[in-house]
Image (tube, helix red, strand yellow):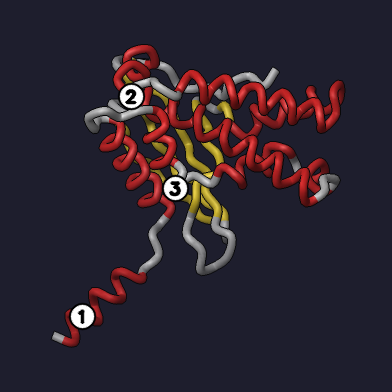
Amino acid sequence: MIASLLAATLLAAAPVSPLNVVKNGNAAVQKAANAPGATVQSLANVVESFVDFEELAKRALGEKAWAGLSAAQRKEFTDTMTGLLRASYAQKAIGQAKADVKYGKESVQGNEATVDTQLTVKTDQVPVNYKLYKASAKADWRIYDVVTDEVSLVDTYSGQFKKILSTKGFDGLLTTLKAKRAQLEKENANTSAASVKESAAGATGAAPQAK
């Protein structure tokens, strides 16, 4: 009895591998997307449990730009990007909810990891690689980037941010992101998962343009 309880405790305490984080995340998205009355908002809550939108936003902005922000600016930027990313990532996840996923290799280097997968949507096969990190040795693995057919979500946003920063500065970037977030959240407010799946079938879900 004691031995079985000890084994159960050790099993529960075992860290979840990057591969299992991705597998469990995809399973949770599929379950939530196919639930009666599912919406983009409900999917966003599920996605946020395994995707670190704050880390994604920080890496997209870049270390140099991030270091130049005040604490208040960092918080406002992070809050804005988190809202935008929740909305856009959830749409992407719903669009791929019925895709056939094949899992490839898991690569771990220190606190960084990559998990390779391949999605089959109808007749299209798309490589999707997930990048994960953990903040400390005891922290959970979290997804911070998705590379779809060699196009990185972090790199895509980073390129857009640099262009806007060079012409409008940080305040202009923040205003642009707030407008895009408001637009996406308005679109998603009463949108069902079923309607998104119909319109997004076969799409790979590129990052929305921050213009």
The earlier-in-sequence mark between 3 and 2 is: 3
Which quadrant holds the N terminus? bottom left
Q: Foreground residue, 194 or 20?
A: 194
- Which x, y percent locates residue 54? 61, 45
Q: Secondary structure at mark 2?
A: helix
Which quadrant holds the C terminus? top right
**Disc number for residue 50:** 3
For image coordinates 60% across by 26% down, the residue present is: 181
Q: Which residue is mark 2?
A: 193
> Could you classify mark 1 by the number of other residues whose Cα lies within 10 Å: few (under 14), some (14-19), or many (20 or more)?
few
Label 3 – label 2 distance at C-alpha: 19 Å
- Which x, y percent locates residue 199? 37, 12
Q: Which residue is mark 1?
A: 5
Label 1 – label 2 distance at C-alpha: 41 Å
Q: Residue furthest bottom?
A: 2
Q: Residue furthest left?
A: 1
Of the two numbered discs 3 and 2 in the rendering, the one whose residue sits closer to the viewer: 2
Q: Foreground residue, 127 or 64?
A: 64
Give the residue type that dot 3 points to. Phe
For image coordinates 71% across by 23% down, the residue present is: 176
Number of numbered tags placed on the structure image: 3
The earlier-in-sequence mark between 1 and 2 is: 1
Label 3 – label 1 distance at C-alpha: 28 Å
- Which x, y percent locates residue 210? 67, 21
Locate residue 192: give its quadrant.
top left
Quick check: can you spot residue 109?
no
Locate residue 90: give its quadrant.
top left
Locate residue 127: give its quadrant.
top left
Give the residue type that dot 1 points to. Leu
Give the residue type that dot 2 points to. Ala
